[in-house]
């Protein structure tokens, strides 16, 4: 019955462990006091207490140190360590129930599905995935919100069991998480680096939510832009990405501008452009001389965010004017 004593002592020292969170009945996560954990991120926590049979162990996935709880306590506090030895080896059975960790309840967050993935800002210089986001000119302030997942299929099957019937063709992807207004991840998009299809795969963890990217950043009181791709949305002010979903927002259509990819030969997109005009939203109709297929391509070609914003403003139309522009724009 040593688990009970172990948990009691973990509870006792938990206040001294930075970012301490209960992740399961016998699983706790915190910043490693041995190595200090990540130097770049103050919130990253890679040390764990976990159970093997009836004993709790310590393991840090940053410095790789593993030890028994006994040795961890010895390292942390010799007094607590001595008490622990006494209590543990006198062999008395507990008469009180399992401690409830009530003191730290607000700290106990739900399991973060992104745990175990590497944020792009923590990749070493020259890493191909870091280079990939640099090449796409994604602003560095977003690097901590993009993640590398080396085994995409097994990751998806872990967070949403049964998504892939088998894991043949396992491959890495860039994970772009969708956060709700409370900063909780409810979906994510995996972008393939190779030829894997589909190139973008969106996985919803909460089926009741619309696949909308950028909710944690958008200001619904101001003019809203809606693009198709999450990466494109990072280059436009107050912008959401609808990732192909039919977005229903509780805002005045005149306060919303839809920006579709520049694909005048794509029937599906043309149809959706007409749909938003019918609903009285504003619509960007790209001018003839713009040959790039989306906003990210324009940025990669060397245009500044301000230049793209100017093109957007100059080519935003509504109602009849939008319909007229569309009839010249469509090539299908
Ligand atoms: Zn460590």
Image (cartoon, grey):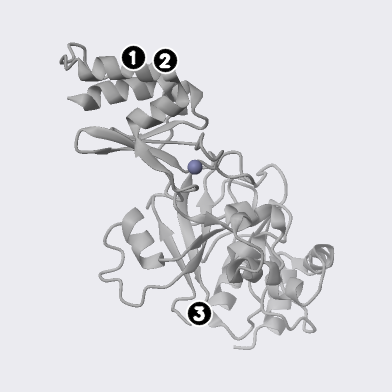
Disc tally is 3
Residue 10: in sight, yes or no?
A: yes
What's the distance in space between the residues labelled 2 and 1, CA to CA? Answer: 6 Å
- Determine whether the residue tagged by mark 2 lies in a helix, strand or loop: helix
Which residue in the structure is indicated by mark 3?
A: 194
Above/below status of 103 relative to 123 = above
**In the rendered view, does 89 fall on the left or right side of 36?**
left
Mark 1 residue crowding within 10 angstroms, few (<14) / some (14–19) / many (20+): few
Q: Of callouts 1 and 3, which one flags the residue occurring earlier in the amino acid sequence?
A: 1
**In the rendered view, does 196 fall on the left or right side of 131?**
left
| Residue 19 at x, y percent in the picture | 51, 32
Q: Of callouts 3 and 2, which one flags the residue occurring earlier in the amino acid sequence?
A: 2
- Determine whether the residue tagged by mark 3 lies in a helix, strand or loop: loop
| Residue 35 at x, y percent in the picture | 54, 40
As rendered, which of 259 and 104 lies closer to the eye? 104
Say if disc 2 is inside 8 Å of ligand 1. Answer: no
As rendered, which of 76 and 110 lies closer to the eye? 76
The residue sitting at 63% across, 44% down in the picture is 39
> Where is the N terminus found, in terms of image quarters?
top left
Mark 3 near mark 2, Cβ–Cβ under 8 Å?
no
Say if disc 3 is inside 8 Å of ligand 1. Answer: no
Label number found at residue 83: 1
Above/below status of 111 relative to 166 = above
Which residue in the structure is indicated by mark 2?
A: 79
């Amino acid at each position: 019955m040593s688990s009970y004593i172990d948990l009691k002592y973990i509870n006792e020292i938990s206040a001294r462990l930075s970012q301490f969170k209960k992740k399961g009945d016998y699983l706790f996560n915190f910043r490693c006091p041995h190595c200090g954990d990540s130097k770049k991120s103050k919130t990253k926590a890679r040390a764990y207490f976990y159970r093997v049979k009836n004993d709790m162990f310590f393991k840090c996935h940053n410095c790789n140190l593993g030890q028994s709880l006994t040795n961890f306590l010895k390292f942390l506090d010799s007094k607590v360590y001595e008490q622990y030895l006494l209590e543990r080896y006198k062999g008395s059975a507990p008469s009180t129930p399992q401690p409830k960790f009530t003191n730290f309840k607000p700290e106990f967050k739900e399991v973060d599905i992104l745990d175990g993935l590497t944020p792009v800002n923590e990749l070493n210089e020259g890493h191909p995935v870091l280079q990939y986001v640099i090449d796409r000119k994604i602003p560095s302030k977003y690097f901590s919100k993009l993640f590398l997942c080396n085994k995409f299929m097994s990751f998806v099957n872990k967070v949403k069991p049964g998504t892939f019937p088998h894991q043949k063709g396992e491959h890495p992807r860039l994970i772009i998480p969708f956060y709700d207004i409370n900063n909780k991840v409810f979906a994510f998009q995996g972008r393939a680096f190779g030829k894997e299809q589909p190139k973008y795969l969106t996985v919803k963890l909460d089926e009741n939510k619309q696949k909308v990217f950028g909710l944690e950043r958008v200001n619904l009181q101001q003019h809203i832009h809606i693009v198709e791709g999450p990466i494109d949305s990072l280059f436009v002010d107050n912008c959401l990405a609808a990732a192909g979903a039919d977005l229903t927002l509780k805002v005045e259509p005149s306060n919303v501008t839809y920006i579709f990819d520049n694909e005048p030969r794509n029937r599906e997109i043309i149809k959706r452009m007409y749909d938003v005009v019918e609903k009285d939203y504003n619509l960007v109709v790209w001018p003839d001389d713009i040959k790039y297929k989306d906003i990210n391509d324009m940025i990669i070609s060397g245009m500044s965010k301000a230049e793209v914003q100017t093109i957007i403003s100059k080519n935003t139309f509504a109602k009849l004017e939008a319909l007229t522009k569309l009839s010249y724009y469509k090539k299908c």
